Image: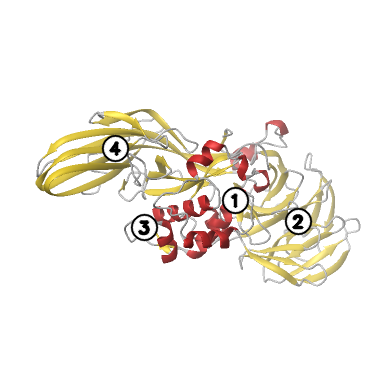
Amino acid sequence: MAKAIMGLRKWGLAMGVVMGMVALGSAETGDVLISFPTPGRCSTGLAFDGEFLWAADRKTDSLYQINPKNGSVIRVIPTPGYHPAGLAFDREYLWCADRARRVVYQLDPRSGMMLKAIDSPSPSPGGLAWDGANLWLADGQEDRIFQISTDDGTTIRSIPSPSDDSQGLAYDGRYLWVSDRIQDRIYMVTPELGEVILSLPSPGPYARGLAWDEGALWNVDYQTDWVYRIKIGDDISFSRTDPKEELLEYTHEFRNFGPGTVKGLDIYLALPQDLDNQEILGEISFNPPPTDFLTDEWGQRVAHYHFDELESGKFASAGYTVKARMYEIYYFIFPEKVGRLKNIPKEIRKKYLVDAPKFALGDPVIQNAVREAVGEEKNPYWIARKIYRYVLEHMFYELAGGWNIAPTVLARGSGSCSEYSFVYISLCRAAGLPARYVGSVAVRGDDASTDEVFHRWVEIYLPPYGWIPVDPSRGDKETPAGQADGFGYASNRCLITTISGGDSEYLGWTYNSNDRWTAIGKCKVETENIGEWSPLTPAGKEESVQPGDYCEPK
């Protein structure tokens, strides 16, 4: 896995680069390559004509031709309307969307003459982009993006906006790029369905116009009054930001209410490790010390405890305390850079394409769903996305208890995070794409909190990127951006403890911990698993708290 981007350039840093530049060889996706002030104070649209930038300004009702190397203004032409918003260049002419008049103007950039006016298909036209044949227009109020004819403005198709307030648009020859001023993100979306493939934090807090320029994206910010050139596409696989440092105390308790005797009890605690999204700080502390340490067939390390002769009324407890730094992580997966299924290492395919009881790969429900979802698709990325889309369309989240097998869950149409995971893994494996699950302890609400529910999701293997997180239950949302949160993204609120292909010799189908026992006579037993979080100070020490401050009643 390539190294992470340790925090993309954000507003303060970007504004501090006065006509500064980053060397192309050292730039990573999301880096600001160059930045300079806008010529006006209310810049909206942005376009690139192959040599110069053009910026629309609503306060001066002007279009500025700008030298992209230093931000100097070459010439200024007036806009035909009074509220210029989106701006695009079609290899010869400029197009300017005017929000006040709800029209899109065609202008000759040489003379400044208005040549044509076409009606906007939406009441609040904003971002504008040219795809080589037609225009694309974003409406932040209707949350739609329209492909329109330059002849008369006829709508050819429309797709949903990634989120609630889309502003700028650009087209890179394959995908649309959309800026959003509420989420402070820039999204790469498919023009066919509007699916979000990846997203970047915007350089400023009010991202407006966008323009594409050979491996880089220009963005103008309405609040900072700066223009930024952002690097797009490199060998960096992910960015991780917003580190959260926490202390986790995890406890697995086993109680025997009798009347018989538990003759033998084995408790297994899955141990967290350093991963792309997390770092273990120091040594893990155990209470009590484990009997020994074991590693299962999936490479998962566990602390093993053995207890003998638990009579009626007795209980056993095993636990650990760990300090961890967790990150919010976004993976930059460009579908065209993903290799073929045969490029996946043989050892990965051998381990993570096998069937298991929870997956039931040969069941007709699974086989029919794979054919319907995947069709003739060969690209591993699109196999994964099409299955993801299919699951979102055919299931809804329901925490009803129990972990049914994948075909039962899919036929029912609802499930918990674990059942979503079983379904997604089953469909991926049936399509020839290696998949596994990860289990975690989650920070619930406040940073000081208790987790007794926990969370599980999926990882798929995409060559050459490696293991990529996919969380179908997280993606069960309305907007494309919300749905994309479940694909190639992991929160800084979950500490992964378990990585498994399923049916582990120690953990079984559980995660975080498991127990097994034998008994003489009738025994009623109860198991309780608790993860208790305490935030760490920047120095890495626990905050001063009183006993019970962060603990729910047991």
Tell me the quarter of the picture where residue 389 sits: bottom right
Any mark on residue 56, and which?
Answer: 2
Residue 452 place in picture, x, y as percent: 30, 49
| Residue type, numbered disc 3 | Asn
User: In terms of sequence position, does the residue under pointer 2 or pointer 3 come before the other?
Assistant: 2
Query: Helix or strand or loop: what does disc 3 sit on?
Result: loop
Residue with the mark numbered 4: 268
- Tell me how far mark 3 sits from mark 4, CA to CA: 23 Å
Any mark on residue 185, and which?
Answer: 1
Q: Quadrant of the N terminus?
A: top right
- Tell me how far mark 4 sits from mark 1, CA to CA: 42 Å
Q: Compare residues 39 and 379 and report the one nearer the observer.
A: 379
| Residue type, numbered disc 2 | Ala
Of badges 2 and 3, the one in the foreground is 3
Decide: marks 2, 4 in contact (CB < 8 A)? no
- Tell me how far mark 2 sits from mark 3, CA to CA: 57 Å
- Residue at image x 52%, y 42%? 329
Q: Dot 1: few (<14), some (14–19), or many (≥20) neighbours within 10 Å?
A: many
Residue 337 visible, this orientation: yes
Residue with the mark numbered 3: 404
Decide: marks 2, 3 in contact (CB < 8 A)? no
Q: Compare residues 437 and 478 and report the one nearer the observer.
A: 437
User: In terms of sequence position, does the residue under pointer 4 or pointer 1 come before the other?
Assistant: 1
| Residue type, numbered disc 4 | Tyr
Q: Dot 4: few (<14), some (14–19), or many (≥20) neighbours within 10 Å?
A: many
| Residue type, numbered disc 1 | Arg
Query: Helix or strand or loop: what does disc 2 sit on?
Result: strand
Image: 489 above or below 150:
above
Image: 553 above or below 241:
below
